[in-house]
Image (spheres, rainbow, N blue to C red):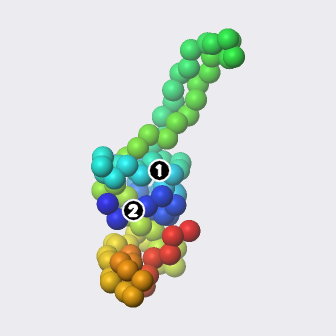
Amino acid sequence: MKLKKGDKVIVIAGKDKKKVGVIQRAYPRLNKVVVEGVNVRKKHQKPTQQNPEGSIVEIYAPIDASNVMLYDAKAKKGVRVGYKLEEKGKVRINKRTNEPIINK
């Protein structure tokens, strides 16, 4: 999986198509990511002693990593990610411009 926590991504498929958000959590083994503001679900919580009335909480559910692309703020588009070997090791690059991708 070429996406990491903190990457700005754009959703390319599903009900939240064209939304832009930041990856909050990545699950590489499941090939899923949790993106801020995308795939929001409502969870009903039972009443407890701490919260006697109960509540409805909004949570971010994971979406498949194939449904998001890294977002290029300059071009305002999604970009593909590649790798290049440099002196300091393997570096992620923007395949359109061949510039290194800087996280955050």
Count neighbours of disc 1 (C-alpha within 10 A) and say few if under 14, some if 14 to 19, many if 20 or more.
some
Quarter in which the N terminus is drawn = bottom left
Which one is nearer the viewer's eye here, 92 or 60?
Answer: 92
Residue 35: x and y in percent read 48, 51
Which one is nearer the viewer's eye here, 33 or 91?
Answer: 91
At mark 2, the secondary structure is loop
Q: Residue at x 56, y 34 (%)?
A: 58
Quarter in which the C terminus is drawn = bottom right
At mark 1, the secondary structure is strand
Judged left or right of residue 36, residue 95 is: left
Placement of 100 over or under 15, stated as above or below:
below
Residue 43: x and y in percent read 51, 26
State the image quarter where residue 4 is shown. bottom left
**Does residue 66 appear in the picture of this structure?**
yes
Placement of 98 over or under 24, stated as above or below:
below
Residue type at tag 2: Leu
**Does residue 94 appear in the picture of this structure?**
no
Residue 61: x and y in percent read 44, 40
- The residue tagged 2 is 3
Residue type at tag 1: Arg
Q: Residue at x 67, y 11 (%)?
A: 49
- The residue tagged 1 is 25
Cα–Cα span, label 2 and label 1: 10 Å
State the image quarter where residue 78 is shown. bottom left
**How many numbered circles does the render carry?**
2
Q: Residue reaching furthest front?
A: 88
Judged left or right of residue 73, residue 88 is: left
Judged left or right of residue 53, residue 1 is: left
